[in-house]
Amino acid sequence: MTTTEARAQGDDTGRRWRGWLFAAYAGSVLVVSLQKGFFTPDNNFAIFRAAFGNLLAGRDMYAPHPAQFADLFKYSPTFAVLFAPLALLPLPLSIVLWSALNAFLLWFAVDRLIPGHRATLVLALVYFEVLRNMQRAQSNSLVTALIILAFVMLERRRQLGAALYICTGICVKLFPLAALSLAIFHARRLRFALVFGTVLLAFIALPLLFVSPHELGAQYLAWKRVEAADALAMGGGSGAGLYGGVMEQFRIWFGVQWPNWPMQLAGTGILLLPIALRWREWHTWDFRLRYLCSLLVYLVIFNHQSESPSFVIAVTGIAIWYVCTPRTRLHTAIMALTILLVSISSTDITPRWLYNHAFVPYRVKTLPCALAWVLMEVELLRRPPQRSGERAEVYELDVAEPEAATKRG
């Protein structure tokens, strides 16, 4: 067999596996939507669907509405407007579209970031996490996709697109604001700051199409109170709800009762340390990609409100890091631990006694993600400068020359 024939055979095999994976994603969207749309409607989706109606009626969206749903609405008023098209559709159709949006926007984002077989492998590694998010009707897959697409837009020097993706993420959950760090050393960053500020103001004001300024101001004040109360929350108690990130791990293992913010501040400092000390490396694709991976993991392990579905964000970062960096035994071990302790631990494969007496009380999902993040940070700080031509081996985007990326805005 010639080299050309072998390559063609490998391409055919890759397309076949990709087709099966796509079928798994599409099939999961349909099966989960059937279950949630007709048999066991999800409370999270009920919260999303009720928000726009409560906004139009002038009701406090952030107050309890036990007749509509349990728990509280904790997203922005703009999210209620963005979700309105789905809220107005029949429940089964809206569930299908919401699940498809979450699953396939992440598929699209990973494809745009690392086209080819690497994208297929990443999407296979995160499949269980995407499925878990669909089963809970959560938005974490969507948020992951928005952050990755913001990175891609910055790589392509499309600042408006990057601003739109980041602002959309902020309107869903506040923590995508950290994606602004991706623009620190990009070209014309002062212009990007202006573009981002303008887009953010437009998103904040979007509900004014439906309510008065006074009503909108009251909704934002109510949202602020909910977020302030959540900021003081410490850990997830004895249930399987909140994981509490690294902060909760310190409480579990060392019995400390520190507030969240000092450790979150320390984590932020560690996240940004490679940029501060090795800022000259920012012009290399490998360094920027590794930082994106570190950011995705950071957003989960230093989030005191992280839940089981939140881990799709971290697992995506770990999977991209594993696929796009040189394979070592340590990398493979961490990836395997992530799959076992994060993705498989919440499935029926795991014995209930092990889940109830180990995974839940010790918040085990955080551990492999924290280990991966520490290794990512070490590699960002210690990795030698990239060799000429190395970027082309992992990525092909039509971007400006590296010198343009370091030009001051």
Image (spheres, rainbow, N blue to C red):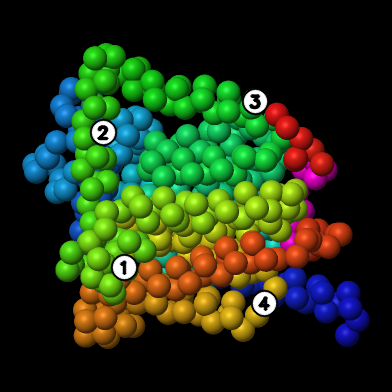
Q: Earlier in the sequence, mark 1 or mark 3?
A: 3
Q: Earlier in the sequence, mark 4 or mark 3?
A: 3
Q: Which is in the foreground here, disc 2 or disc 4?
A: 2
- Disc 4 and disc 3: Cα gap in Å? 39 Å
- Disc 2 and disc 4: Cα gap in Å? 44 Å
Q: Quadrant of the N terminus?
A: bottom right
Q: Nearer the viewer, residue 219 or 40?
A: 219
Q: Earlier in the sequence, mark 4 or mark 1?
A: 1
Q: Nearer the viewer, residue 46 or 216?
A: 216
Q: Position of residue 384 (x, y in %)?
A: 75, 65
| Residue wearing tag 1 | 250
Q: Is residue 400 magenta?
A: yes
Tag 3: amino acid: Arg
Q: From where the camera sits, is residue 77 visible?
A: yes
Q: Quadrant of the C terminus?
A: top right
**Discs 2, 1 touching: Cβ within 8 Å:** no
Residue ID at (52%, 67%):
374
Residue ID at (57%, 54%):
273
Tag 4: amino acid: Arg
User: Is residue 137 depicted above or below 210 in this figure?
Assistant: below
- Which element carries disc 4, helix, strand or loop? loop
| Residue wearing tag 4 | 327
Q: Is residue 255 left or right of residue 395?
A: left
| Residue wearing tag 3 | 191
